[in-house]
Amino acid sequence: MNQEKHIAIVGATGAVGEEMLNCLAERNFPMSKLTLIASARSAGQTRTFRGEEITIKELTHDCFDGIDVALFSAGGDISLEYAPSAAMAGCIVIDNSSAFRMDPDVPLVVPEINPEAAKTASKNIIANPNCTTIISLMALSPLHKKFGLKSIIASSYQAVSGSGAAGIAELETQTKLLAEGKEITAEHINCYPTQIASNVIPHVDVFLEGGYTKEEQKMLFESQKILNLPDLKVSCTCVRVPVFRSHSVSITAQFDKDVNVAEAKACFADQPGIKLKDDPDQEIYPVPLDTTCKDDCLVGRIRKDQVLDNALTIWVVGDQVRKGAALNAVQIAEII
Ligand code: A2P
């Protein structure tokens, strides 16, 4: 990225948008100007970036003139409506929503896995994958290179940050009410179908025909696209848990080749973006708090699966807001 790029964040006041701002600052991202964009509700508010106060602008179809790269994180409907206007204005959109991910002309990129795909953005739009998919593939991609990935059976333990600022606020409110011995009533339940504090909910995104949810099918279709494995089989159960930021995923992965735990662990020796934390004898394994507000994902509990041939069962953890969203988008901006 040359020094002269003008960058924008669309959805700058949201959980992911705020983290994009942090990532740009921490990584000393080279840019000539930063524009912050949100809804009319936030227009006029300010945010500080590199010691400078920036006034938030309202999102409009003609607000993209002169902007080179726009990081979108304001939801799928906003992306569908405004990303084409940005692209038409010559701006490269890096979109965090699911709106364009399965468009064959839109690359779906995890920079550590398929950076070359980012060079083929014929529509001026690059999609940032689903958070659970990114975190899972950070662990599976090095194993795939060694053993050849064939199928995935996974259960996710997803933080409320995946529902944006509203999800975080809902868990905070409900946790406080429980601590005070007060009742949680319908007025405190807005983001999720039922209470999230002191509970787990096997339901992320909408249900589709066949009984899987849209989130679970993202793991299937997005993994196939990112790894360029159209025959990859995936069966996933996505679960919302009362954790603020980091997602965890339990994965049983079957491979073409015979697997070996020591060789599997060695795959993570010099791997960017993921570290091994795996010493069961010492009760050492990754937990969500280990990765919260951190860039790297952690993998552990690597063992030979007892049911399937050529299979490993693993546990991977990553900060949903960072590697699952904001950081991955900023890394894409760095490589284009
Ligand atoms: P705003 O704060 O002005 O509503 P989150 O996913 O954390 O809830 O964040 C959603 C982000 O998307 C926020 O920055 C929010 O801005 C932005 N957003 C929501 N609706 C619109 C809209 N109609 N136009 C522009 N930005 C929007």
Image (spheres, rainbow, N blue to C red):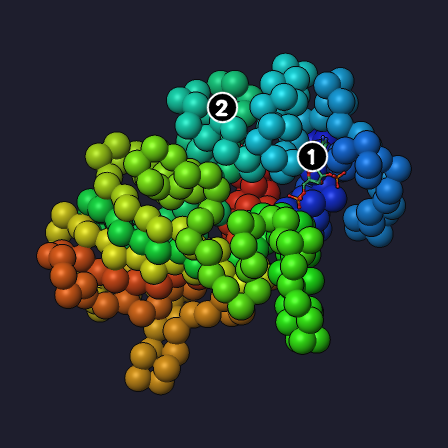
**Distance between mark 1 and mark 2 Cα atoms:** 19 Å
Q: Is residue 24 visible?
A: no
Q: Amino acid at mark 2?
A: Ala
For the residue labelled by badge 2, is the local secondary structure a helix, a strand or a loop?
Answer: loop
Q: Amino acid at mark 1?
A: Val
* Disc on the earlier residue, 1 or 2: 1
Q: Is residue 335 left or right of residue 71?
A: left
Report whether the residue tagged 1 is closer than 8 Å to ligand 1: yes
Is there a contact, CB below 8 Å, between mark 1 and mark 2? no
Q: Quadrant of the C terminus?
A: top right
- Tell me where residue 291 appears, x and y as whole percent: 52, 64
Q: Residue reaching furthest bottom?
A: 282
- Tell me where residue 7 appears, x and y as whole percent: 70, 34
Q: Is residue 18 left or right of residue 261?
A: right
The answer to whether residue 125 is above or below residue 211 is above
- Residue 10: assigned label: 1
Q: Residue at x 33, y 40 (%)?
A: 211
Q: Quadrant of the N terminus?
A: top right
Q: Residue at x 65, y 59 (%)?
A: 185
Q: Residue at x 60, y 48 (%)?
A: 191
- Residue 248: assigned label: none
Instruction: Give the crowd class for mark 1: few <14, some 14-19, many >=20 residues within 10 Å.
Output: many
Quarter of the image holding residue 188?
bottom right
- Residue 121: assigned label: 2
Q: Is residue 124 left or right of residue 175?
A: left
The answer to whether residue 91 is above or below residue 200 is above
Q: Is residue 194 visible?
A: yes
